[in-house]
């Protein structure tokens, strides 16, 4: 069948993207779903920094590639006769398909699935298949097994989680990446540090603000939000931050962010979360924790960057530094759990949704994401 996807043919186009137009809406041939795969009608897809870092070339991927990875949709057809999915099921798609069989999947850490990571690196579905082709029959790669900025997609069942009941499609999409990554970083990766009375969040995009909501839900009394964009600091306050630090002030003589946080907390926070993907910000987040504190990082810096921290502090102050991929989540367990928290009002993730775009506004949307203007923009299909 035909689908219209959003294709990136080469990385590294200069901004503004509204002018260079790196993403092109393209009609492609979409194969039928194979065994263990689903044909899904996409309803909504979010614009995320992981898409942006492919556009800029920061995280190189196989080209051409149909982008997008944070999405919700409706199952049209299952490739397997005995599938657990049925036409009409509302699903949320996640960016790491889990094979269920490798040593990481078997030990409850599907975010580290080795075949899943290999498929994502190659730009294929989990099975190794590529279901998208151009008019000449040439393959167009899948982005993180999803290729969400398309009206129809074929995905592995291992990339999909059924929504219990029904959710607004635009809100449902956020659970696939921003909420799973941000709330998962708190509830899963930082589990041994909870409850944490004092938490600092570095970077207030979709992931950072989801982490902030989770920090509040687990009962933090003091939540310090750090960013360079004033409007995001304001939103963080509305969502429960008790203090804010504008990191721009540091370069204009306002004092180092970590020193200010240590002053505010009388020695440093119990838990710091870094979502920017910058080694200097990560070092600062680490420095903002106190004795016994934990730092969790969910940002992806450039691959060649090194981190410098005082080595002795790990032992002498029993501090911890942990990485968090996909929020260390088990999506089939955590998406329903976070949806329930949303419905109970404990995790108001609808507040992260800043704009709804039409499919032909995606390039402009990435300009807004790159400039820090927008938190989470969702394309409606
Ligand atoms: Zn993402
Ligand atoms: Zn696996």
Image: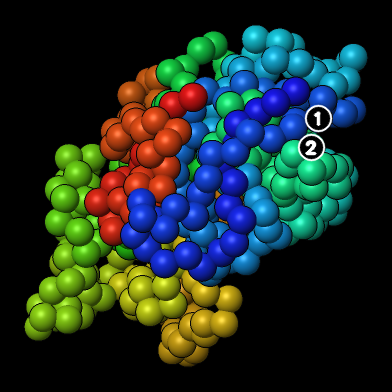
What residue is shown at x 87% (from left), y 29% (from top)? 34
Residue sticking out furthest to the left: 253
**Residue 190, x across and y down, in percent:** 49, 55
In the displayed image of the protein, which residue is found farthest to the front? 136
In the shown orientation, is residue 154 left or right of residue 235?
A: right
Q: Residue at x 51, y 68 (%)?
A: 12
| Viewport quadrant of the N terminus | top right
Residue 339 appears in the picture as rendered: no
The percent coordinates of residue 19 (x first, y second) are: 36, 55
Q: Position of residue 332 (x, y in %)?
A: 66, 31
Instruction: Check if mark 1's residue and mark 2's residue have beta carbons within 8 Å.
Output: yes
Q: Nearer the viewer, residue 317 or 299?
A: 299
| Closer to the camera in the image, 5 or 44 | 5
Vertical order, 239 against 52 (above or below): above
Q: Residue at x 34, y 31 (%)?
A: 356
Residue under label 1, please give it.
31
The quadrant holding residue 69 is top right
Q: Secondary structure at mark 2?
A: loop
**Pointer 2: what residue?**
131
Pointer 1: residues within 10 angstroms few (<14), some, or many (20+)? some
């Amino acid at each position: 069948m035909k689908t219209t996807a959003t294709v990136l043919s080469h990385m590294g186009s200069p901004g503004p993207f509204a002018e260079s137009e790196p993403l092109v809406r393209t009609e492609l041939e979409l194969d039928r779903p194979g065994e263990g795969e689903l044909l899904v009608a996409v309803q909504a897809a979010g614009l995320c920094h992981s898409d942006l870092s492919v556009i800029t070339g920061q995280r190189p991927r196989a080209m051409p590639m149909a982008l997008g990875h944070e999405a919700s949709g409706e199952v049209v057809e299952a490739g397997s006769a005995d599938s657990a999915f049925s036409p009409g099921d509302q699903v949320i798609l996640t960016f790491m398909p889990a094979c269920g069989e490798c040593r990481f999947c078997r030990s409850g850490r599907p975010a580290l699935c080795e075949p899943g990571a290999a498929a994502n690196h190659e730009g294929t579905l989990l099975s190794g298949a590529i279901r998208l082709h151009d008019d000449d029959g040439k393959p167009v790669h899948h982005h993180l097994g999803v290729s969400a900025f398309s009206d129809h997609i074929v995905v592995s069942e291992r990339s999909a989680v059924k929504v219990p009941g029904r959710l607004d499609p635009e809100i449902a999409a956020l659970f696939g990446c921003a909420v799973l990554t941000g709330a998962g970083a708190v509830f899963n990766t930082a589990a041994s540090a909870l409850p944490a009375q004092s938490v600092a969040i570095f970077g207030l995009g979709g992931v950072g603000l989801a982490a902030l909501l989770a920090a509040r839900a687990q009962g933090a009394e003091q939540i310090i939000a750090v960013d360079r964009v004033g409007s995001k600091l304001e939103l963080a306050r509305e969502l429960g931050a008790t203090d804010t630090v504008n990191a721009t002030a540091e370069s204009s003589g306002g004092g180092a962010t970590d020193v200010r946080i240590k002053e505010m907390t009388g020695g440093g926070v119990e838990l710091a979360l870094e979502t920017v993907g910058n080694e200097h910000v990560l070092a600062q987040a680490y420095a903002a924790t106190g004795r016994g504190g934990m730092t969790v990082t969910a940002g992806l810096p450039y691959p060649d960057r090194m981190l410098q921290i005082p080595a002795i502090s790990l032992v002498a102050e029993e501090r911890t530094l942990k990485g968090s991929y996909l929020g260390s989540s088990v999506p089939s367990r955590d998406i329903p759990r976070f949806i329930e928290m949303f419905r109970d009002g404990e995790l108001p993730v609808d507040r992260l949704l800043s704009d709804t775009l039409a499919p032909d506004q995606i390039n402009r949307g990435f300009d807004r994401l790159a400039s820090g203007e927008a938190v989470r923009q969702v394309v409606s299909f």
